Image (spheres, rainbow, N blue to C red):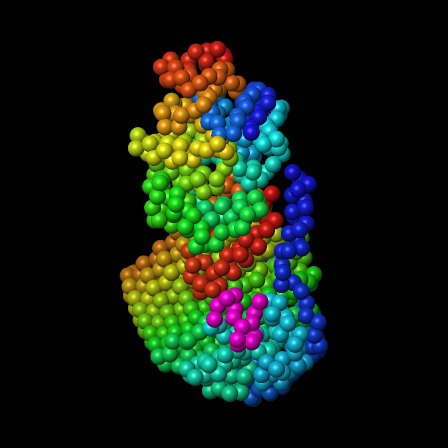
Amino acid sequence: MPAINETVDQVKSVEKYKYGFVTDIDSEFAPKGLSEDIVRFISAKKEEPAWLLEWRIKAYRHWLTMDEPDWAKIGYPPIDYNDAYYYSAPKSGDEGPESLDEVDPELLATYEKLGIPLHEQEVLAGVKNVAVDAVFDSVSVATTFKETLAEHGVIFCPISEAVKNHPELVQKYMGSVVPTADNYFAALNSAVFTDGSFVFIPKGVRCPMELSTYFRINAANTGQFERTLIIAEEGSYVSYLEGCTAPMRDENQLHAAVVELVTKDDAEIKYSTVQNWYPGDENGVGGIYNFVTKRGACRGKNSKISWTQVETGSAITWKYPSCILQGDNSVGEFYSVAITNNFQQADTGTKMIHLGRNTSSRIIAKGISAGKSQSTYRGLVKMMPKADGGRNFTQCDSLLIGKECGAHTIPYIESKNPSARVEHEATTSKIADDQLFYCRQRGIAEEDAVALIVNGFCREVLQELPMEFAVEAQKLVGISLEGSVG
Amino acid sequence: MLKIKNLHATVDGKEILKGIDLAMGFGEVHAIMGPNGSGKSTLSYVLAGRNGYEVTKGEVLYNDKNLLEMKPEERAGEGVFLAFQYPVELPGVSSMNFLKAAVNAVRKYRGENELDAMDFLKFVRETTKMLNITDDMLKRAVNVGFSGGEKKRNEVLQMAVLKPTLSVLDETDSGLDVDALRIVGEGVTALRSPHRSMLVITHYQRLLDHIVPDEVHILADGKIVRSGGKELAVELEQEGYSRYTADAA
């Protein structure tokens, strides 16, 4: 029996992270390290207007005065911010290709290998109608279906392009939800962000296809700092999905993104994430440090922002997608599955800030810990004095696999309005031996049985994902937990 | 097809099975009856390969293969099925998904094509009707909130779709009312065939009115103390087990 397990484990370690390859491509780097000159270098590279450079410098100077946050339940050696590259771009992508014909074939091959179609006639995982923005290290290398979307007035482009073509929108909204000085990593991002996606849905438009951005870190010793901004005008709707992968490396790489969402009256944004950054190996060596600030502002009445995240990757995840429920009757949702295995650490959750009347929020968080990993749900529900009739429901469930992992639930509840109602439920459970045996007796191998049981545990969240991605996510759940039993 | 020779097994260091010998041919139905604590459930778990049930002596040959060397899922692939006395709940896992995962895992093991969703649905519907299982039940999470009768019918459904060659039914009658017992009994009887053998473990004779056995064995204190035809079950029902527990003690 042990001999069999050993073989199985060996096979698995080969199969485990299929996105771990490196693309051999000629890239241009900024000089190593972080300084005001580097900030200027990035801004100059992107031919940015003066206001944006100023904005970056201000953020950088503020960042210098800040301390790295230490309240999360994560541990890691100090990050040397001067020992990394803050800009890396494939040489061909320097000017931003006009069409796919100009994109380096190596890059196209990379995305093909990742299963991300950049030719519009191709379809993603058998699904039509997904527009993709592909961000490779510090730059966007391709955006598909731009013309089709433009017919509906939808703008979907790299944020660096939006700075050039729609400066008024970028200037108005960027930093309006996550101010540059919001937190340490948001300030860092504001100073050195390189690319990301920009989405604008005009009044009354239901975006005709799923929008998706695929982030890929390729270069060694390089941080990725992307910035995404989505604006949904009155009565509009958009569903957006981001995916992320990185090569397997022994070093830790930093990813510090900022995502800002704005919904006007009666508008809705559904934002889904499948985060599969390289998690490090089974001894905890390597992996991405994922420090991300995501926040949405429901500015209009009856507007809605829904976050769904499946977090399976990264050595460290520090992430709290939040909603500011400003408009009356606005709705915020947070559906999360966070899986940690081996030595991964995740401190993730949400903030629901109720400002308007009859605002409601719903939080469903599922944490699965295996190996020697630690998983923490940290969430804040805040009812402000004017949030008459505000409602929140929170459910946090933790599932433990094995004896050496940990799960923690830290809910903060602040209510300044007596008419507001806040509910919190939490459970912790283990995969029982009899459940595993039951599945195995029916012919289902142990690893598959774990995947089946965990998928059942996460079902409420996974069913919130767009159909086309739910299947992928289910598979990912299984893969992430490989080697966690036996 | 099944040969159990001098089987000894311990649970938590305590010897429960103390030398079981049993031989079954193709298509035969054998009943194992015995008082509580005689080792009936232990025998079923040992045959299915549950962790913690350690075989200390003896062997089990199944179609001339050493069953005890196989993992539980391999035994299932080889055609061994255990209908649980207490079917286990799997929250969030729909019965349909579970059945499909099981059937395809077993088909794969047997070198057959995996069924897609449509074919599978057709395949399952053939059986659900007979067992009075509704589509609604297939959508619900496995055994979660099921009544005793629903759980046992669900076990028989799994048995039907997995097409085992050896079914071990562990107290399948427990917790069933007369009507549920009849449905389950008919369901199991319908699955009898010259290729399928069944080992029916029960405390009471009443299940054997529905599933008529070829042979009956009495298990007491970890050993088979008497074997006979179906009339032995009737005799037991009248006389009780006291004679055997006294013998064993």
Give x and y (percent) for residue B110. 56, 44
Locate residue A451 relative to residue A390 in the image: left or right.
right
Give x and y (percent) for residue B21. 56, 21
Residue A125: say if magenta. Answer: yes
Decide if residue A63 is in sight here: no
Q: Quadrant of the C terminus of chain A?
A: top right
Q: Is residue B218 above or below residue B26?
A: above
Give x and y (percent) for residue A210. 46, 72
Q: Quadrant of the N terminus of chain A?
A: top right
Residue A346: say if magenta. Answer: no
Q: Is residue A386 above or below residue B232?
A: below
Which image quarter: residue A238? Answer: bottom left
- Which residue is painted at 41% across and 50% down in the image? B122
Q: Is residue A93 above or below residue B204?
A: below
Decide if residue B3 is in sight here: yes
Instruction: Give A265 or A149, whichever is nearer the viewer.
Output: A149
Locate residue B28 relative to residue B173 in the image: left or right.
right
Q: Main secondary structure of the magenta part?
A: loop
> Which residues lie in the magenta part?
A115-128
Q: How many marks?
A: 0
- Which residue is painted at 68% across and 49% down in the image? A10
Instruction: Give A39 or A313, whichever is nearer the viewer.
Output: A313
- Which residue is painted at 35% across and 55% down in the image? A423
- Which residue is painted at 50% across and 37% down in the image? B164
Locate residue A415 relative to residue A79 in the image: left or right.
left
Instruction: Give A278 or A453, whichever is nearer the viewer.
Output: A453
Give x and y (percent) for residue A26. 71, 77
Which image quarter: residue B34? Answer: top left
